[in-house]
Image (cartoon, helix red, strand yellow):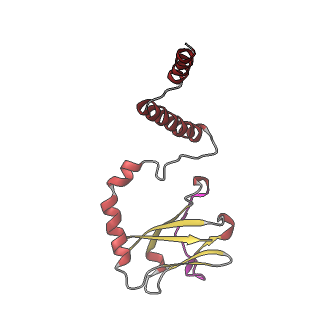
Amino acid sequence: MKNDNTTTTNDVSRSRFKINWGTAIVIAIALFMSFILYFVIKVQTNSKYDNELVVEEYYKHDSHFQDEMKRVQNAHDLKNKPTFTESTKGITVAFPAEFEQAKIKGKVSLYRPSNKKFDFEIPISFSESNPTLLIPKLKLVDGRWDIIMEWQYDGKLYLSKETLYL
């Protein structure tokens, strides 16, 4: 009889904590999904993490992609291209001497990928004494800057893109 009691006690204790492979896999998947869902909710609700789009009207911008590629190709086909150089005063945009400054029209957009608040635009304008465009260092924060220069000369449209690290 002693033998029967010990067998019954062992069988009861084994059946209480028995988990098969299917149950273990479901529990592991549920825990993993909860872990991932926790971080997704944390990032979406925390104002420290900014979830802004790169371009506000993405689909409208994308519909003009072919026109943009033509302007980029026009700039690429130039023998002498505009140059962007960093100096202690800021970023200098210089056009080749073959361009008449009075015929150049357009704008320079500076885009800061890490923070939209620093983005700004400057119209292309030159003074008679200075044939270059200077973007003052005071407006620029150290780090990566994407520069997009949209301009036209003699009715032909151009688009130049450059990335600078300050």
Instruction: Provide residue 88's location: percent of width, then percent of height.
Output: 68, 78
Going 56% across and 66% down the picture, which residue do you hit? Answer: 145
Q: Residue furthest top?
A: 1
Q: Is residue 60 left or right of residue 42?
A: left
**Left or right: where 102 falls relative to 140:** left
Q: Residue at x 45, y 81 (%)?
A: 100
Closer to the camera, 24 or 81? 24
Q: Which residues are magenta?
A: 118-133
Residue 57, x across and y down, in percent: 42, 48
Q: Quadrant of the C terminus?
A: bottom right
Residue 151: give x, y in percent of width and height. Answer: 43, 69
- Identify the residue shown where x is 47% and y is 87%: 97
Q: Considering only vertical position in the picture, is 15 above or below 95?
A: above
Which residue is more in the foreground, 40 or 63?
A: 40
Q: Quadrant of residue 112?
A: bottom right
Position of the N terminus, as image quadrant, is: top right
Q: Is residue 158 above or below residue 53?
A: below
Identify the residue at image location x=65%, y=70%.
136
Residue 58 % position (x, y): 41, 50
As for residue 53 lying within the magenta part, the answer is: no
User: Which of 66/94 is in front?
Assistant: 66
